[in-house]
Amino acid sequence: MGRYESRFTRVVLNKYGKKIYFDQMSSHEIEERVKECDIVIVPCGSIECHGPHAPVGEDSFIGAYIAERVAYETGVTVAPPIWYGSHPSHHYGMIGTIPIENKQTYIDYVRSVCKWLIHSGFKKVLILNSHGQEYVLPIVKDDLIVKDRVKALIMVTSWWSWVRDLLAKVGEEIAPGVKFETPFIHADEVETSVMWYIGPDLIDKEKLKKAKAEKMVGVLKDKQDVYVDKAGNVFGKPFGWYDISQLPEVKYYPVGVVGDATKADPKKGEVLIETCIKRMIEFIEWLKKTYPPGVVPDVVPPVP
Ligand SMILES: [Zn+2]
């Protein structure tokens, strides 16, 4: 048998031939890196059920994929992903879903990671969320500034925020011959298309045929679609889906899909994810020029 190569020991390089991942660098390499570029992306995903056809690591894989591609082009560093996530109540109980139950534990974990990345010299931290936990991550940013008083620029975003315009065009073409038929929810047409594009071998195409929610329901009954948004808050409704105690997934969506994954197509995922990456690269290039290594805006408030 030849030498076995673990996924974690395969060196991942950017287009300049330098390492992308923080955990693959030595401390000396980190010291050198931050002199060139002190921007780090922290992917925050989840391990959760994504239906019978897709891996439970889907959210973490999507976030890490985007971060890697952005880093490949721009020379920024990617921190080891935060694999496990924080979950709203309705996710609990599905096979494969591993929630970090205590919200404060999760917040403090991500906060510690960011704090010591900053200590290592990364003065711009981009927390890249890829799971329905955008309601907790801004607290990480505030705690770092107010409680830890770190002098760094901390930014929180989710991948879908970069393509909300495309996600809102349900039923309209987003590229020639490419359109989403259903709105973005969970393990559905949108998310499966993305996973299929970035990791085709991780999608079971046979099991996908049965990956459809039996019924679409909500606590606000016939007013659900009027008042409650779906994933990514792309429709500007008064409530985010995580703002209301929703019906438990394990009871109402036992297949593990909320939406219709049978309509997934890697071409749809390609348009979405390549647009997201392109827009994020444009932002990072602007950030690099505006705040060179070591330069940060004054964001720490005065002590009373
Ligand atoms: Zn997901």
Image (cartoon, rainbow, N blue to C red):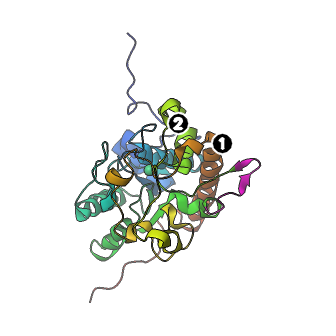
Query: For this view, does 230 lie left or right of residue 102?
Result: right
| Snapshot quadrant of residue 286 | bottom right
Percent position of residue 172, x then y: 71, 58
Residue positioned most to the bottom:
304
Identity of the residue drawn at 71% across and 48% down = 178
* Residue 119 visible at all: no
- The amino acid type found where label 1 is placed reads Lys
Magenta stretch contains residue 270: no
* Rendered position, 158 above or below 23: below
Mark 2 or mark 1: whose residue is earlier in sequence = 2
Per the rendered image, the range of residues in magenta is: 168-178
Looking at the figure, which quarter contains the C terminus? Answer: bottom left
Mark-to-mark CA distance, 2 and 1: 18 Å
* Rendered position, 296 above or below 266: below
* Rendered position, 7 above or below 31: above
Percent position of residue 138, x then y: 39, 69
- The amino acid type found where label 2 is placed reads Lys
Magenta stretch contains residue 173: yes
Identity of the residue drawn at 42% across and 38% down = 52
Q: Tell me the SS state at disc 2.
A: loop
Q: Which residue is mark 1?
A: 267
Q: Tell me the SS state at disc 1.
A: helix
Query: For this view, does 117 lie left or right of residue 297?
Result: left
Identity of the residue drawn at 31% across and 58% down = 86
Q: Which residue is mark 2?
A: 209
